[in-house]
Amino acid sequence: MGPRPKTIGPYRLGPPLRRTGWGLLHKASDPAQARPVVVEIVPKEVFGRREQAAVAARFRPAVEAAVRLHHANILPLLDYGETEDAFFVVSEFVEAVPLADMLVAGGRLPPSLGLLYVMQVLAALHHAHAQGLVHGRLTPAALMVSSDDRVRVADFWLERLVARRAAESLPFQAPEQFAGAAPAPAVDVFAAGVLLYRVLSGDLPFKGRGGDLERAVRAGVPPVPSRVNDALPPQLDPVVMRALAKRPEERYASAESFRANLGAAASGLLRQRVSGGGGSGLQRRSFSPGQVIFEEGDPGDCAFLVESGAVQIVKRGRTGPVVLATLGKGEIFGEMALVDDQPRMAGALCAQRATLAVIPRDAFQARLGRVDKVTQKLLTVLVNRVRGAARDLADLRGLIDR
Amino acid sequence: MGVTLRSVGRYRLASLIERTLQGELYKAFDPAERRFVALLLLRRQEGAGPLAGGRGAFEAAAEAAAALHHPNILTTHGHGESSGHLYLVTELLEARTLGALIDEGCPAPKRALGIARQILAALAHAHAAGLLHGGLTPSEVLLSGEGTVKVKAFWGARRLAAVAEAERPYLAPEQVVGGAIDARTDVYAAGALLYRLLAGVAPCRGRGPALIDQIKRNAPRPPSVFGGEGVATFDEVVLQALAKRPQDRFPSATAFAEALQRASGVVEKPVAPAHGRSFGRRRLAVGDMVFREGDIGDCAYLIAEGSVQITKGGGAGAPIVLATLGRGEIVGEMALVDDHPRMADAVAAEDAELVVIPRGEFRQRLERMDKVTLRLIEVLVGRLRNMAEEVTALKSVVE
């Protein structure tokens, strides 16, 4: 007999999806509608004792304002509530990943894809601003991207509920927010500018911690995106930089005007999008010669793509290590870890200073989901076939050896 | 490996899959057919495995089961005896049991219903052929990696002692008192499985005599008492399946399935939605060939409706059915990877509609993925091609 399922309010909680700045996201089911939902639970203990009463008073108006938003690019809020020790906010369940997960350190999106995402964010902001609501905390963690490349902006309620900010959101904060100004649409325009800079260039415009970051945001001038990523057309630079103006009145007057200017400057790129882009938002790692990438027998949960340098695949032999292959730019190794949880069949050693893109198993599986249903099904069958064939081979070798 | 590898009959034991109350389940290689199979080696005992009727009953049941061909029934290939052990040979499936799914927590009601629908389809088919399952429990139901349900051995009446304690809550009242069983006994067990999926607990709980007493007397509470969302819709139907007296239950698995369908009010969605440029389709009447062994293939098929049998050796004798595939499953997918001839015959087991996926079209759809993913798929497909060739070569060496 298993334990009784956990519930909050009328919702039955499924497994936790991930941690947020303030609490935990759970997949859950809605008793009334028999549909899956997502419940974000914010434990009251994250607030100080004295703060709790003030937060409780703000909770209802903050969420109610966000519930009123209905837009294709805004994650619909369905319900909210409060228990003795937590607040919770219920939104529609969408098969999607936060943009933050697609932008692991140093990764950038294909420009056309990044533009497509930011255009949708601006459409969402335009809608919210027209309803008198400012987001105030736009970050890649608040943007949910589904497999059809649709973006849904989440967390429109957060700014009015909690005063403290997660460290990850600070680089997206406008200069006037550091000075304590009340959030206005110009704050969202600035944050969308930072986001655009980030997805196009692969780097944040303003970096550092604490006072350093604040100084950079309030006074620093970042290099234009095309200087950070030379694959970018320079005509995008002025569009991005205007959104990042220090004085709110020097930025676009509205999210809509930002969107129109961006659309005009990027029309060529957006059209290219159909064929799909190259870059990939993958994490990269560098190795020096002689460094071990993984050992034979290690558990594996990722594959590697050689972007530069060379890698040797080495297997232990009776008399010593045997080099099975030397791989160079564009080649892939460790790929069985994407379909199987067997230990590494051979080791990998850096032969020449190398940069490797790391492809985690779950990221690969998520990417397989980005095609139509029939193709997806075929890929699942083929991946299962690979797994089955690997096991059959091991068993046949065992039968022959004995 | 810790396991002493050996042979059973003509089968070479490759690896132990699991040990159960009934015996040991192995992945085994059949040199005659050059394929891997699952081999259940029964414990030696005076009875014959789980069956009440002894060895003759086992052989009769295995032969009858081998004649069952349905997408939701695990195919039985054969049986035999080796050094005093009886054994059963079935298709090998990369699958986990319903028990493993349950251990992870309740699936959504929609998924639970999908599983129940497939279990009931299997029962209806077997009952029409005059076979009873008689021991439907979470370990008797397999879920393939792609979500298809396959019900294991239709062996009819079993000895209570051969049912593991953890699986007894799924036994019907008439079984625990040693009474006669019929199709309604399987209806009860299917109801108990659905109850477990919806509620998170079995309808009757406890151990030993207390459990037996509950099964005989206590009416279960509605599943929604435990489950909650969306479950209440099915309370009435599930409780009817779990009626203590067989005459108060649904008279057949089909009647149970229809009642569930009505309660859910959901119309089944087509398998392949019209999505962008749609694939071509092929309609087949029962008995029509999808392809023949040795044909050069350049496409795979997705079964939109009906079912397809994969068979071998259709020449003089009766062909051997390797597998039966149903709605939502894929046939002939290796043609997307290589241009080797088809390895077996595929024939429509009932009127069927197939979505045709040509290799070129599949490749084009993949092109829409980002470059890294596409490259990975190419590497994996290359791997699959090499491994498939090596598997074929090694199979001819193992005799």
Image: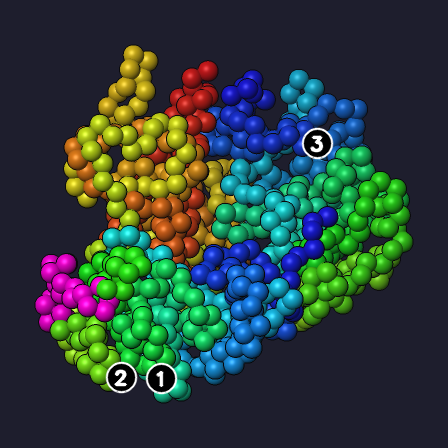
Q: Which residue occupies the extreme top position in the image? A: A319
Instruction: Give the structural element (helix, strand or loop) at label 3.
Output: loop
Q: Can residue A330 be seen here?
A: no
Residue denoted by label 3 = B22
Amino acid type of the residue that numbered disc 1 sits on in the rendered structure: His
Determine which quarter of the picture holds residue A316.
Answer: top left
Compared with A298, A70 (above or below) is: below
Foreground residue among A371 and A330: A330
Residue at mark 2: chain: A
Residue denoted by label 2 = A254
Relative placement, left or right, of B312 versus B56 is: left
Q: Can residue B325 be seen here?
A: yes
Tell me what residue is drawn at x 26 percent, y 46 percent.
Answer: A284
Residue at mark 1: chain: A
Q: How far apart are marks 1 and 3 (CA)?
A: 67 Å
In the image, residue B78 lies at what x, y percent? 61, 33
In the image, residue B32 lies at what x, y percent? 49, 27
Q: What stretch is highlighted in magenta?
A: A216-237
Q: How far apart are marks 3 and 2 (CA)?
A: 72 Å
Tell me what residue is drawn at x 48 percent, y 82 percent.
Answer: A65
Q: Distance between the residues labelled 2 and 1?
A: 9 Å
Compared with B351, B382 (above or below) is: above
Q: Do the residues labelled 2 and 1 touch (CB within 8 Å)?
A: yes
Compared with B323, A245 (above or below) is: below
Residue at mark 3: chain: B
Determine which quarter of the picture holds residue A401.
Answer: top left
Amino acid type of the residue that numbered disc 2 sits on in the rendered structure: Ser
Residues packed near mark 2 inside 10 Å, few (<14), some (14 to 19) or many (20 plus): some
Tell me what residue is drawn at x 64 percent, y 62 percent.
Answer: A7
Residue denoted by label 1 = A129
Tell me what residue is drawn at x 60 percent, y 32 percent.
Answer: B18
Q: Do the residues labelled 1 and 3 touch (CB within 8 Å)?
A: no
